Image (spheres, rainbow, N blue to C red):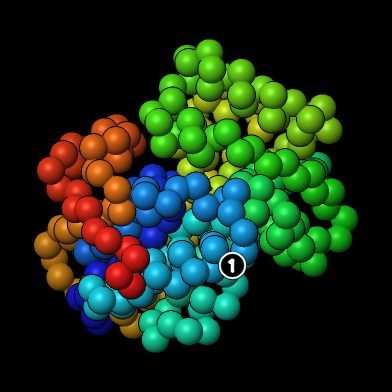
Amino acid sequence: MNNSPIGVFDSGLGGLTAVRELMSILPNENIIYFGDTGRVPYGTRSEDTIRKYAFQDAKFLLKHNVKMIIAACGTVSSVAVNLKNDLPVPYTGVVSPTCYTAVRTTKNKKIGIIGTSATIKSHSYKKIIESTDPEIQVIEQDCPLFVPLVENGFISKDDQIVRLVIKRYLSPLMEQGVDTVILGCTHYPIIKEAISSVMGENIALIDSGRETAIYAKKILMENNLLNDSNEKGNASFYVSDTPHGFENVAGVFLGKDIKHEVEQINIELY
Ligand code: DGL
């Protein structure tokens, strides 16, 4: 048993998709969240820059004595693959747990993968899926406008701009007849309703944040690191730019008001 917090990070709001799930399946756990809002997006940057940012983010969380680190970020999970080796605590990214579920979900063996440009360029999801089941056809698509839309609060399924951008990126996947789509960037589940409304409810959308939270619980159990307190856990939120925009969208997404609970830090010190 270990009552230290779980550390979760992302470039911005996306990792909250894992946090929301962690709060639901592990309500007694304490969580420290870092969203690198001063340097978002990660997905259009070079591999070296993404790796540098990922190491700094993890270092910040380790300062808070976390018992596990979750890179709730498809881009970091795809590019900073060595991060795991340099950490003194258990770690997971989002790619493997998400592929695991997608392979078990598809019926027609056609899976679409959407993510940031860096993630799609790495073929991280595609490689795992094809090595698990070579009969599965994988169609990849990067969606670089999704992250700025989410970070700026454009998340409603009724917003015409949101619908138009989704249609533009996802039409090729629909034309190819995929029955399952991996939301390979953790920002995307925030617009899951809108994606589903454009693509149709018969397409299974696999939420990388959710699958990763479920996998993190397994790791904590296996390592005997679960929190044994009976009290509800606390969540603390840190960002690297002004908290205002983050607080607004995060509050809507988490279904709770976190105004004045988000602290700004200088990530360049780590
Ligand atoms: N949410 C992240 C991901 O899963 C990062 C998106 C970005 O910063 O470009 O890829």
Q: Quadrant of the C terminus?
A: bottom left
Q: Where residue 230 sits in the image (x, y, percent)? A: 13, 66
**Viewed as shown, does residue 239 lie left or right of 130?**
left
User: Which amino acid type is marked by label 1?
Assistant: Asp
- Between residue 29 and residue 158, name the one nearer to us: 158
**Residue extending farthest right:** 135
| Residue annotated with mark 1 | 48
- The residue lying at 45 percent from left, 48 percent from top is 40
**Viewed as shown, does residue 266 lie left or right of 136?**
left
> Residue 158, relative to residue 138: is it above or below?
above
Number of numbered labels in the structure image: 1
Residue 199 appears anywhere in the view: yes
Give SS at disc 1. Answer: helix
Q: Where residue 221 sits in the image (x, y, percent)? A: 38, 76
- Quarter of the rendering containing residue 142: top right
**Viewed as shown, does residue 129 lie left or right of 136?**
left
- The residue lying at 60 percent from left, 49 percent from top is 44
> Residue 270, relative to residue 14: is it above or below?
below
- Quarter of the rendering containing residue 58: bottom left
**Viewed as shown, does residue 238 lie left or right of 186?**
left
Q: Where residue 15 sits in the image (x, y, percent)? A: 41, 52
Q: Where residue 4 sits in the image (x, y, percent)? A: 22, 75
Query: Alpha-carbon neighbours of circle 1 within 10 Å: few (<14), some, or many (≥20)?
Result: few
- The residue lying at 79 percent from left, 44 percent from top is 139
Cβ of mark 1 under 8 A from ligand 1 = no
> Residue 89, relative to residue 114: is it above or below?
below
Residue 21 appears anywhere in the view: no
- Quarter of the rendering containing residue 233: bottom left
